[in-house]
Amino acid sequence: MKRTRMDEATCPIARTLDVVGDWWSLLIVRDAFLGKRRFGEFQKSLGVAKNILSARLKTLVADGILASVPAADGSAFNDYVLTPKGRDLFPVVIALRQWGEKYGFSSGESFPPLVDAACGKPIAPLEVRDAAGKPLMPQDTILLPLPQEA
Amino acid sequence: MKRTRMDEATCPIARTLDVVGDWWSLLIVRDAFLGKRRFGEFQKSLGVAKNILSARLKTLVADGILASVPAADGSAFNDYVLTPKGRDLFPVVIALRQWGEKYGFSSGESFPPLVDAACGKPIAPLEVRDAAGKPLMPQDTILLPLPQEA
DNA sequence: TTAGTTGGTTGCATTTTGAAACCGAATGGA
DNA sequence: TCCATTCGGTTTCAAAATGCAACCAACTAA
């Protein structure tokens, strides 16, 4: 009756969700992208219970998404910073953000915009493209059978 | 002590995760992209308990991601098909998939590839771009403060 | 020195999840 | 026509995750 694991799934989506598919992990990663690094910063920003945050940070570190390093301010505490593996979640976070921007707000509401630091303009909507760069719709793609190894 | 809701969050990412941030919803959406439409198809593919699947389909329909329509085969049952809002999750699913492809498999393993139906070649890695089309790294972006309404 | 902050852990109540049993309606076969 | 089986669920109940508050140890500031 444990939570169903998907780490043996043949599907890459399932394997990703097995690691970051819970309620808090991707929000922690989001905050890490925004420069937060201390336990207390995450806790205050997210409003998550400290035991939950503690458990999540542990698994994110164990999964190689965050690294626990000595604090930059010289204090005796730890900073939690994104590894390259964690930074590669950027498109995931942006995709979630853009869908939320489009569907998560009623017309009267607004949200803090994420913009290009250089030009100040909003980033472009993500597009799924083929090898040549042409945009692809969902129905333009097919899942091939698993290749058999020798 | 219920699960903390994030539907009031100012962050679009949090609002998205409030809707599809659980263990199963995005896998149901994935299967819907692959053409699955019947309760039994989802259940067999996912191996999820039927009560959970039933609850998830209900909320996905309530959230406007799936629509419940009369079955295409003329039987008395229902099909669950993606709405335009659901189809707009395509970049999310692809982002999760590409991260899983890169980090979710050991070197000996392989996974079914998702390819361009027209040319048979794998789809390109998603890239976050600025308004002009130039690729952006995470540190090239900044979150602006919430704009004040009049 | 002592009060407060930081970064947790522990304990417990509530909620969610998961497995299996159950059930009615639709379907199929003899 | 009758019976069995599948389909699409709901109910029941145990196990696990979540959330809150209390606690605590180490560091820090006054």
Image (tube, coloured by chain):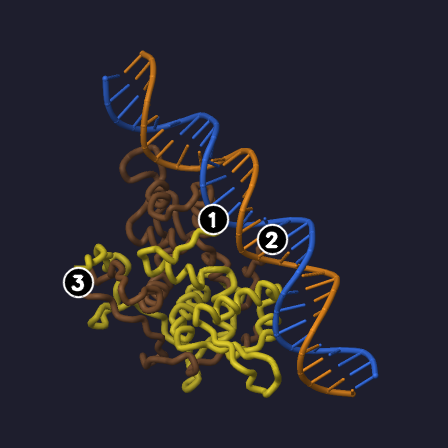
Chain colours: A yellow, B brown, C blue, D orange
State whether residue B12 appears in this view: no
Q: Do the numbered discs 2 and 3 sit on residues whose CB atoms are within 8 Å?
A: no
- Local packing at callout 3 (Cα closer than 10 Å; few below 14, some 14-19, many 20+) is some
- Residue at 55%, 68% (x, y): give it: B10
* Drawn side of residue D28 relative to residue A107, left or right: right
- Local packing at callout 1 (Cα closer than 10 Å; few below 14, some 14-19, many 20+) is some
Look at mark 1 in the image and give the residue it sits on: B59
Q: Label 2 is found on which chain of the structure?
A: B
* Drawn side of residue B51 relative to residue A7, left or right: right
| Residue A99 pos. (x, y %) | 42, 64
- Label 2 and label 3 in one chain: yes
* Drawn side of residue A148 relative to residue A105, left or right: left
Residue A11 image-quadrant placement? bottom left
Look at mark 2 in the image and give the residue it sits on: B2
Residues at marks 2 and 3, CA–CA distance in whole angstroms: 46 Å
| Residue A135 pos. (x, y %) | 26, 67
Q: Earlier in the sequence, mark 2 or mark 3?
A: 2
- Mark 1: amino acid: Thr
- Mark 3: amino acid: Gly
Residue A75 image-quadrant placement? bottom right
Between B126 and B43, which is closer to the camera in this rendering? B43
State whether residue A114 appears in this view: yes
- Residue at 34%, 33% (x, y): give it: B76
Q: Earlier in the sequence, mark 1 or mark 2?
A: 2
Between B144 and B113, which is closer to the camera in this rendering? B113
